[in-house]
Image (cartoon, grey):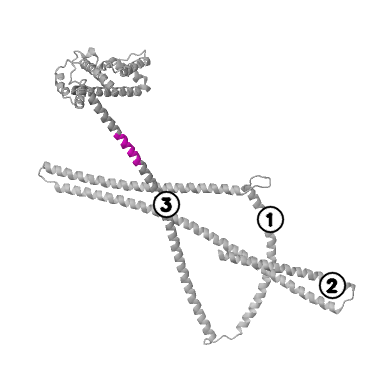
Amino acid sequence: MSKLDTKQRNIEKNLQSQKESLYSVCYQVETIGARVAHMEGAQAERECSAELVERENRLKDVCARHAARVALLERHSAKLHDDMRRLARDLETKNAENIKLQSRLRSAMLNVEGGDKDLQASRDAWRRLRVEEALLRLRVAHAARAVAGLDDTAFTLDKQRLQLDAAMNERLVEISARRDMFSVQKRALFEDCGKLRCEIREREQRIEQLKKRYEIFIGSLGKDESGQQLSVTFFKIKFAAERAELRTRGAALDADIGRREKDVSALEATLRVVHAAHQHFMHHISPLAADTPEIEELNGLMKQYYELRDELKLQNSRIAELEQLVNDMSSRLTILSDKNKQLTARQVESESDLDSARERVARQESRLQNAHDVVNHNARRAKKLVEGVDDWRIFQMAIWVRDYAESATNALQSLSDVCAGSPEHRSRLGALLSSTDLQRHLSRHQRRLHAFIQRLISDAKQAAPYKEITIDAEDTVFSTSSESIHSGVSIASGYTRHLATFRRSLASKVQESALIDDIPEQARRSTVSLRVVTLGIEESARMIRPSITQSKKSLR
């Protein structure tokens, strides 16, 4: 491209110099014509002499020579214009080829990126296949050992234990292999996510660049004479006017070209005549002998020309290969630099995430340690404040009772939330609570739970004041005092089995085996009802309440 530009500039300079010389010749012709006219006017006034006639003829000859020189310069100018047009067409073709090669380069780069992605997917599939193959080998080995171990003899406990250990070990190996496969898939997915994020960021940056370029282009258009912002429409109109002007100029140039073509056809006819004369002259010239020095020199020069041409072709091919290699290496370097930047950004993000996670873990550990210290301190204070083993057990049972009361409150709150959207179920829940007399199982100090149950019952009555709801006592877990006395419900029945389970769980928590030992005695006395158990719980709560109040005061 640079050579074409320099050649075009040289041609333009030559054309400008020839135009200047043409202008000077035209000026000389005009001045000479003016002089001739002046001389003719002077000659008309006086008699014509021989000297004036000779001078006039000499000036006419000079004018003819200048006219021939002007015609020659015009022909040279036309040739230069043709060369410029030809060079412009060549430049356009080269630009089109350059655009095509750039598009091919971009498509090749996209194909390379697609190939890299396909290669990564193939590697992941190959790794998964290897893991599956290892699993199949483990299964085949396990099946082979199982088939080899089959025999008519009975398995002993030791053999069965060894087989179970072997099966568990194989299962652990399979689990570890699956875990490795999943970790590989996870890493591949993370890499794909990182690539997609980078591509999205590149597309966003490209969009922002195009927007800014468009804004800069609109701002660079300037303003017209009236002070308004110029737009693309204004330039379209302006370019259309310029095209119309160029068409008129082109029509004039086409007419000029037609005249020049006539001159060229005349020159071609002259050249054909000259060529025919030259051929006639060359036909009658005797050819040189093959052993003359001129022919030998010509053959040597031809041989040297062909050798140099082959060497030039070889050098051009080597240069093309080296250029292709340089382009490939530059593209690979660009890809590697992009990947390095992506990995560096990911490393920085991972390090920041790791630091934040370490800080969170340290804060959680400090909080957990503080909580353990507070719990241990409160436990030591509680042991110091409570005297005796029985008081400490009573204190623990009071804590358990408080926890169960909180659980009961949460359960009733959940039931209330569930039945909030259905008035029928809410009224049924209130009727169930009122018919089972659930408040008799609560102690007097559980005032919040009493108030909550009373509110549920009152809300159910307000929701369905005119509708009677009958609840079958056999469908409920709790029974009223009138039904529990002499009802024959024992520990073995379905209603009191929940109580036995509660006693066992409570005995394991408070470390009281007497609660479990009393279960058979309670089963033998089948006439004991749930009310007796409830009264016993309330009596124990009354015994525990003063100690709980005293311990709370001491803790405060």
Cβ–Cβ below 8 Å for labels 1 and 3? Answer: no
Image quadrant where residue 21 sits: bottom right
In the image, taking residue 176 as reference, residue 47 lies left or right, namely: right
- What residue sits 63% from the left and 67% below the top? 11
Q: Is residue 363 magenta?
A: yes
Residue that appears at 68% across and 47% down: 225
Rounded to the nearest angstrom, the CA distance separating label 1 from label 3 is 54 Å
Residue range in magenta is 357-369
State the predominant SS element of the stretch in magenta: helix
Q: Amino acid at mark 3?
A: Lys
Q: Is residue 59 left or right of residue 293?
A: right
Secondary structure found at label 2 = helix
CA–CA distance in space, label 3 to label 2: 88 Å
Q: Position of residue 468 (x, y in %)?
A: 33, 13
The picture quadrant where one finds residue 264 is: bottom right
- Label number found at residue 39: 2
Where residue 443 sits in the image (x, y, percent)? 26, 17
Eye-nearest disc, 2 or 1: 2
Instruction: Name the residue type under label 2.
Output: Met
| Residue 317 left/right relative to 13 | left
Q: Which residue is mark 1?
A: 245
The tag earlier along the polypeptide, 3 or 2, is 2
Residue 546 visible somewhere in the drawing:
yes
Residue plotted at (48% across, 46% down): 204
Q: Can residue 261 be seen here?
A: no
Q: What residue is disc 3 on?
A: 341
Counting from the top left corner in percent of width and height, residue 124 is at 33, 51
* Crowd tier of the residue under label 3, counting other residues whose Cα lies within 10 Å: few below 14, some 14–19, many 20 or above: few
User: Is residue 514 depicted above or below 367 in this figure?
Assistant: above
Q: Nearest the camera: 272 or 1?
A: 1
